[in-house]
Image: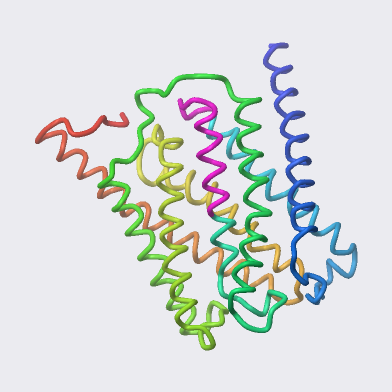
Amino acid sequence: MRTTHATSIRVIVISAVTIVLATALAIVSHAVLPAPVDDLDFDSALVRLVGFPVVAVSYFLLLFAHCAIVLQTFGRRSGLPKLEVGWRFGLAFALLYLVGMQEVVVDASPFEAWGREFVVYQFFMGAGDAVPVFALCMVLAYLTLAPGRRAASARTASTREAIAIVAVIALAFFVQRTIGHTTGLVHSNIESYPVQTHLWTALFGAVLGCVYVVLYPVFSRRDGPVARSIRLVLLTIGINWLLFNSFIGLLFSGVMPQMLLRSGLDTAVVFVASIVVLRYVSTSRANDQVTGPMSTSPK
């Protein structure tokens, strides 16, 4: 009992220190960006009350704390080697930040028009989040997860399954965002930059599908498409995407409802799409087992 308690305290302390260090790395990375961040007018009530530095630090602490929690909660039960758990979570979150930062919303940037400067600036902004979160996941996995071999029940998606997952999630996201953009439900710069907006929408939808495939082995021991997608999409990708988008809402007045709306719609659509495609994958796998041993069952 004492050993278990001591281990829990050790994990909490290591996690807290790692989150703080990752936050410091993110803040320093953004501070040295070669871009005119000072030109942005942060006018939210929270920024006026406590100042931009406090808001930024609090945001990163919360964002990285969520990453640490899901890694600890689901990673230790996955049956995967600890470093594999680390790079899978790290890569998933890094992809969300890198590509998510390229969304064509020019009025939330220091630039007046979309172009090369916007893309480069957003890339460095995304990298400033992606590198610390990847390091965070790798360090936490190495220091806090028990070593182990890949369990027989932990499997990766086959090439055919991965293509189906990416295609369905990407299509669902693209349709949902396109409807949101054209109706005005989801704010964007589609009227000024229709091609760029559609390209980003297609790209990020594919990225969401790839993130699902990357994390799939971590959650493959969970029974049933619904239970698996609740943990993978809602609790892991969805909450993190919501937190990531909420940063803009913390900085600009009146923007938070829009950030919550678009994040919620994105998560809901990906959740439904993942259940649909997992049912297809399960049916296809069952048929393969009847006709021949093409893959190992997660059960």
In the image, taking residue 166 as reference, residue 8 lies left or right, namely right
Q: How is the image coloured?
A: rainbow
Q: Is residue 203 above or below residue 95?
A: below
Query: On the image, which quarter does residue 147 sit in?
Result: top right
In the image, taking residue 181 as reference, residue 128 lies left or right, namely right
Whether the magenta-drawn stretch holds residue 92 is answered as yes
Whether the magenta-drawn stretch holds residue 274 is answered as no
Quarter holding the C terminus?
top left
Q: Residue furthest left?
A: 291
In the image, taking residue 183 as reference, residue 94 lies left or right, namely right
Q: Residue at x 54, y 41 (%)?
A: 89
Magenta segment range?
76-95
Closest to the observer, 89 or 220: 89
Closest to the observer, 228 or 121: 121
Q: Residue furthest top?
A: 2
Percent x, y of residue 269: 43, 62
User: How many numbered circles does the render carry?
Assistant: 0
Quarter holding the N terminus?
top right
Q: Residue at x 50, y 66 (%)?
A: 265
Q: Residue at x 54, y 47 (%)?
A: 236
Closest to the observer, 222 or 114: 114
Q: Residue furthest bottom?
A: 191
